[in-house]
Image: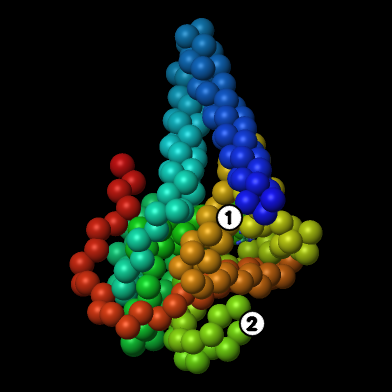
Amino acid sequence: IEEALRQAQKIEAIGQLTGGVAHDFNNLLMVISGGLDMLDRQTDPARRRRLMDGMVQAAQRGASLTRQLLAFSRRQTLRPEPVDVALQMGGMRELLDRSLRGDVHVEFDFPDTLWPVEVDPGELELVVLNLAVNARDAMPNGGTIVVRGENLPDLNDEQIVGDYVRLSVVDTGVGMGPEILSRVFEPFFTTKEVGKGSGLGLAQVHGFATQSRGMVRIRSEVGQGTSIELYLPRSHRVPPKERHLIDLN
Ligand code: ADP
């Protein structure tokens, strides 16, 4: 019975997933096909430009949705290896700058020696990218995002025991109230406009953290900001020096 229930839940989740994504894609395709239709009849250069910008944006959102979805469905096949988080984050600077706006900046705060952690490096990058984009969206008037790494020796928590690295992404944005906080890890829960948010970001972050034998905690205050904290297990292996990054193109 347990197994049958799990199976049923899985099928329901897959149904939700495909339904939600089909809906988002449909909206984006409507923007593009409707835009092309109007473009055909529009002669004013400024209006044509605006239409085209809108279509490019819709296409980019579609691409980003696909990326998130792929990351989400890859969950089962995470390949943990020793990762130097500070090095990895340093390599993400350009990617982050490209994903943020001019009035949103990223600062890194790492100790001289941060322990290596045992995670899937590609997935870690997607997770941090997700968190940075959420932080950006929470700061409509701009601000600073701090990405912080800390060694936490001999952690003795209800959920995890041992040596952990805490990787936090901190913003000074709008924050979240209890009703939102209690739902953020649900797949497809989003407060963003249709087409802007997939609601998969934090579900993916949660999946990544638990599958890496760590956990994720959120501290947030309305009007003050949010700190998303990933607890990742210390690795006792030596990480490689060079890394490839997510290819955004
Ligand atoms: P999405 O970003 O596509 O909406 P997520 O799962 O990443 O999906 O986030 C779910 C919701 O959680 C967001 O719509 C937003 O309401 C809230 N949220 C996430 N991160 C933050 C943050 N840093 N500050 C405020 N709210 C946030």
Name the secondary structure under disc 1: helix
Residues packed near mark 2 inside 10 Å, few (<14), some (14 to 19) or many (20 plus): few
Could you say where residue 177 lies in the image, as x and y percent from the top left? Answer: 76, 63
Label of residue 158 in the image: 2
**Is 222 above or below relative to 100?**
below
Q: Position of residue 9 (x, y in %)?
A: 66, 46
The numbered dot on residue 48 is none
Q: Report how many numbered discs are placed on residues in the image.
A: 2
Location of mark 1 (residue): 203
Asked whether the beta carbons under mark 1 and mark 2 sit within 8 Å of each other, the answer is no
Outermost residue to the right: 179
Identify which residue, 88 or 95, lies in the foreground: 88
Cα separation, mark 1 vs mark 2, equals 21 Å
- Tell me if 206 is positioned left or right of 2 in this view: left
- Mark 1 lies within 8 Å of ligand 1 (Cβ measured): yes
Q: Which residue is at the front of the view, 44 or 30?
A: 30
User: Could you say which is closer to the camera, residue 99 or residue 156?
Assistant: 156
Amino acid bearing label 1? Ala
User: Is 5 located above or below residue 161 in the figure?
Assistant: above
Q: In this rendering, which labeled residue sits more in front, label 1 or label 2?
A: 2
Q: Residue at x 39, y 58 (%)?
A: 78
Task: Report the residue at 47% width, 82% height from top.
Answer: 164
What kind of element bears circle 2? loop
Q: Amino acid at mark 2?
A: Glu
User: Does residue 235 appear in the picture of this structure?
Assistant: yes
